[in-house]
Structures are given as structure tokens and as C-alpha cells.
């Protein structure tokens, strides 16, 4: 009897193992059919001065460790006027030689070489590149080339198998597989792309290569990895192919990309900020400042407004608004639904055209002599702006934060910030004097949350301090 049970158990285990094998995906046909449309891209550029590992940002920048582009550089930077070579991938979208890749793969390249799977090499011409989405279009003089099939990223599901083909570390036509981990990801300083997150193994040299679904359709362009070492750590990001194709169409037609803009600075909604603004739920994009003379100001948009919809499309988080606006043709008359002082309003705005982003200037200098006053209920030592500071900041009034103590240390407040206004129950009150500010603070109950409108450099942002203490 025991022997029969053992044989039956073995039969069940073998059957289970067989079912598992039958259930695993087979990538052989995909690799055979789609591999020839994937290319190796190598670039040569003249290095002018040293650059830490060739990355476009400073070594002390948090982004240096957080997101490392895939292009391997010579360690320690390059001496002046020396050749610097880099490597990436791409894929053919036109039989006449049009190829998609990442903008950072060809950025600053003096020469671009494309190598096909049949070992033919071509010098490529850069048609255009868009750094904001990290998409570039290059062209080689050839015909009758194999091309990829394009899929629909909107139909991707979390948990679905996907495949990357590229040239990690220069190993041409390497295939790696994984699943979709998430969709619509927003990354730091990447407001225009709803990234596809996967656990597909991506390494230096995979940049610009295609991400396929199991039907052999390209659904994305591999662009970023999350890494502290520079190598694969299980988190990779791809640009949805529909976003990339829209960009390449503009690059092919005009050599540049035209985007809409509103002329506002926005920030995420939080539970505390929603309560301060009198909004019943955590949704929308909060307008922290409005560009003078910009489309939003002309339409009547104000700091403190919450944009709930753009052209009828819901804005559930601040990351969604830039994508919707950027995809709108400049000059289009669009409709905004905003929350203002406890009411929903409809506002018409003529969308402007996005220009190159400007870096904020440094924040105002602190007063020469430290303030002798004690911290207020927010744990802040503040002083009224001098006439010179008001003139430099182009502000009529405000309070300069000189020191952050106690409760203030729990919020994102820094010495040099300027308190412009205080928000309570949906009402925004401009701060004009120190006495006025302290009286307003005195009206809050102990333990209440206080939301401030802060000026930092040329930008404005809302900051909430949780749990007001009892006294001054």
C-alpha cells in the first residue's frame, strides 16, 4: 500500500512539474522574428573637460545615485579633447532606415554608428532628439530593412510577461524577460512620461532598446534603471511606445517637439492640504504659483486653486497634469475645472507653448544679524522682509524664515524661505506683518495643522506643519 501511495505521489508531482513547464512562456519565436529589427548603436564624441562617469549631472546630485543612464563611460571622466565612446540600442520602425532610441544615447555625439544583426554597419544621421521624454530618431541610408510591430501600452496589464532585446555591455541581441511591475509611474524630473515599470534585467547598453509584449509587439523603449551600483537591481523603466511615436512624428516633421503649457507651478495634494483648502478628498493638482503674464494668469487662475480636470479628463494627481497639457497643441482653447474657496469653477484657458526650463535662482540672503526673538507656535524664527529683499523678490510683503526649530523641523521648511500667505478652511490670507502673522497663528487650536504658502528662490510651494503646539 505504501508503495502505491509513493508511486501515486510521484505521479502527481511529475504531473504538477509538467504543468508548470507547459505554463512557462516560450520566447524563441519572438527572438527569431523580432531580433533582426533591433540594432546596436555606438557613438563617439569629443570629451571637453572631465565628467564624473560621463553623467550629465553633478556627482553630488541625488539623481546621480537614484537614476543612472545606461551609457557606460570611461571611469574617472575623460581628459580634455579625448575621444569618448558610448553604447546603446535601438530598433527599426521604418524599412527605409528610421530608428528609435533614447535621446541620452546620442546626446552630444559627433558620430553615430548603427550595426545590424547581419553585421552591416551604417553611419547614422540624428533627425532629432527630445531630452524631456528621452526619445531620439536617427536615420541610416538603407532600404528593405526588417521593422518591428507596434503594440498598445494601454492594453498592458500588471503581471504580464514582457521581453527586452538589446546590447547590454555590448553583447548584441541579448534577450531578457520579466513582468510588468506597474504602469503610469512618475519619476523625479520626468513629468511628461507615464513610465512602464518592469523587472526585466536591464543593464548598460540596453538603453534605447525595445520592450516587447508576448505578441511580439513593441510596447516601450527601455530608458531608466533604479540602481545604486549602476547595474540591474530589479527595477527598470520604459517609455510607452505611443508616447515615443508621437514624439518621433514631430521630430521627423520639424526636428523639434512642440508642447503646450499653462504657466503654473503645481504640487501634490496631501490629506492635510486638502483639509486646509476645504476639499473633501485628496485629488487634483495644487497651483502653488502662477507665471506673470502666462496663459494661466490671463485665464484667471490663482495660487491655491486646485485643478481637478483638464479638457474633461480627471486630474487625480499632480503628475497627470503636465502630460495632459504637454500633449495639447499650443493655441488650443481648453477647459479647466478648478476648486477655489470651497467651490468648483470652470475656467477657459488658451494653452501656450512650452519653452526651455529655467533653473530657479538662489534663495534670498538671510538678515545679517540673527533674530533674538523666540520661535513662534510653528517652531520658526521669522522676521519681516527688508525693503531690499522685497525689491529683489518682487514681493510686497512676507516673512523671512531665519531659523527652524522644534515643530518646524518636521516640515519641509528651510532658513531663507519666505512665508507669503497662510491657508485655513479654504481661505488664503496674505502675510503683511509679523504681528498679523502671530495673531493668525493664535486663532488655531492646539494640535491643528497649519498650511503656509512659501516662496523659495523663484518658486512657490505649499507646506503643511502638523500638530501646532500650545503657546508662542
Image (cartoon, rainbow, N blue to C red):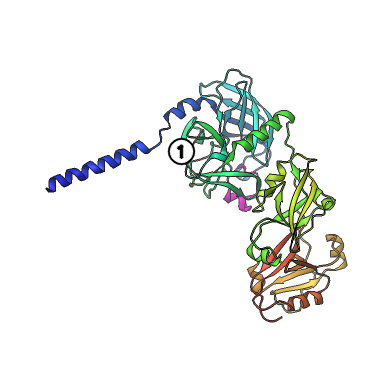
Question: For the view shown, which residue lies furthest in the bottom direction?
Answer: 471
Residue 127, above or below 313? above
Reply yes or no: does residue 65 show up in magenta: yes
Rendering coords of residue 262 (x, y %)? 77, 48
The image quadrant of residue 205 is top right
Disc 1 element: strand
Residue span colored magenta: 53-67
Q: Which residue has dot 1 on it?
A: 177
Residue 337, above or below 118? below
Residue 447, above or below 421? below
The image quadrant of residue 121 is top right
For the question of whether residue 15 can be seen, the reply is: yes
State the residue at coordinates (64%, 76%): 447
Return the residue nearer the eye: 407 or 298: 298
Reply yes or no: does residue 245 show up in magenta: no
Rendering coords of residue 369 (x, y %)? 79, 73
State the residue at coordinates (82%, 49%): 294
Q: Is residue 434 left or right of residue 154?
A: right
Return the residue nearer the eye: 50 or 386: 386
Q: Residues within 10 Å of mark 1 (few under 14, many from 20)?
A: some
Amino acid at each position: 500500500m505504501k508503495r502505491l501511495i509513493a508511486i501515486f505521489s510521484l505521479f502527481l508531482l511529475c504531473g504538477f512539474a509538467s504543468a508548470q513547464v507547459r505554463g512557462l512562456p516560450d520566447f524563441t519565436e519572438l527572438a527569431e522574428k523580432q531580433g533582426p529589427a533591433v540594432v546596436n548603436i555606438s557613438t563617439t564624441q569629443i570629451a571637453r573637460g572631465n565628467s564624473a562617469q560621463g553623467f550629465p549631472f553633478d556627482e553630488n546630485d541625488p539623481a546621480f545615485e537614484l537614476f543612472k543612464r545606461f551609457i557606460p563611460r570611461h571611469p574617472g571622466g575623460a581628459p580634455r579633447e579625448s575621444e569618448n565612446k558610448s553604447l546603446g540600442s535601438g530598433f527599426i520602425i521604418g524599412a527605409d532606415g528610421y530608428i528609435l532610441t533614447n535621446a541620452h544615447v546620442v546626446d552630444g555625439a559627433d558620430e553615430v554608428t548603427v550595426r545590424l544583426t547581419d553585421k552591416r554597419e551604417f553611419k547614422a544621421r540624428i533627425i532629432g532628439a527630445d531630452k524631456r521624454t528621452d526619445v531620439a530618431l536617427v536615420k541610416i541610408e538603407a532600404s528593405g530593412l526588417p521593422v518591428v510591430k507596434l503594440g498598445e501600452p494601454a492594453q498592458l496589464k500588471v503581471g504580464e510577461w514582457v521581453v527586452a532585446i538589446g546590447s547590454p555591455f555590448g553583447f548584441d541581441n541579448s534577450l531578457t524577460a520579466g513582468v510588468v511591475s506597474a504602469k503610469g509611474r512618475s519619476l523625479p524630473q520626468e513629468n511628461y512620461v507615464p513610465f512602464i515599470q518592469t523587472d526585466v534585467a536591464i543593464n548598460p547598453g540596453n538603453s534605447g532598446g525595445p520592450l516587447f509584449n508576448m505578441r511580439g509587439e513593441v510596447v516601450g523603449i527601455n530608458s531608466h534603471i533604479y540602481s545604486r551600483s549602476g547595474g540591474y537591481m530589479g527595477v527598470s523603466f520604459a517609455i510607452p511606445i505611443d508616447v515615443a511615436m508621437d514624439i518621433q512624428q514631430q521630430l521627423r516633421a520639424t526636428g523639434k517637439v512642440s508642447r503646450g503649457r499653462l504657466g503654473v507651478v503645481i504640487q501634490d495634494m496631501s490629506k492635510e492640504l486638502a483639509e486646509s483648502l476645504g476639499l473633501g478628498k485628496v485629488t487634483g493638482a495644487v497651483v502653488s504659483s502662477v507665471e506673470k503674464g502666462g496663459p494661466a494668469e490671463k485665464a484667471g487662475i490663482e495660487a491655491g486653486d486646485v485643478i481637478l480636470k483638464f479638457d474633461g479628463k480627471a486630474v487625480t494627481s499632480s503628475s497627470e497634469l503636465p502630460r495632459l497639457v504637454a500633449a495639447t497643441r499650443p493655441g488650443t482653447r481648453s477647459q479647466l475645472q478648478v476648486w477655489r474657496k470651497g467651490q468648483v469653477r470652470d475656467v477657459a484657458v488658451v494653452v501656450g507653448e512650452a519653452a526651455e526650463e529655467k533653473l530657479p535662482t538662489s534663495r534670498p540672503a538671510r538678515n545679517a544679524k540673527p533674530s533674538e526673538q523666540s520661535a513662534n507656535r510653528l517652531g520658526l524664527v521669522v522676521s519681516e522682509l527688508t525693503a531690499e529683499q522685497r525689491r529683489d523678490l518682487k514681493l510686497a510683503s512676507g516673512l523671512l524664515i531665519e531659523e527652524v526649530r522644534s515643530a518646524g523641523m518636521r516640515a519641509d521648511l528651510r532658513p531663507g524661505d519666505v512665508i507669503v500667505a497662510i491657508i485655513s478652511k479654504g481661505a488664503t490670507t496674505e502675510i503683511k506683518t509679523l504681528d498679523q502673522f502671530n495673531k493668525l497663528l493664535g486663532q488655531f487650536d492646539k494640535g491643528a495643522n497649519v498650511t503656509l504658502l512659501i516662496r523659495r528662490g523663484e518658486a512657490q510651494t505649499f507646506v503643511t506643519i502638523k500638530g501646532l503646539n500650545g503657546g508662542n
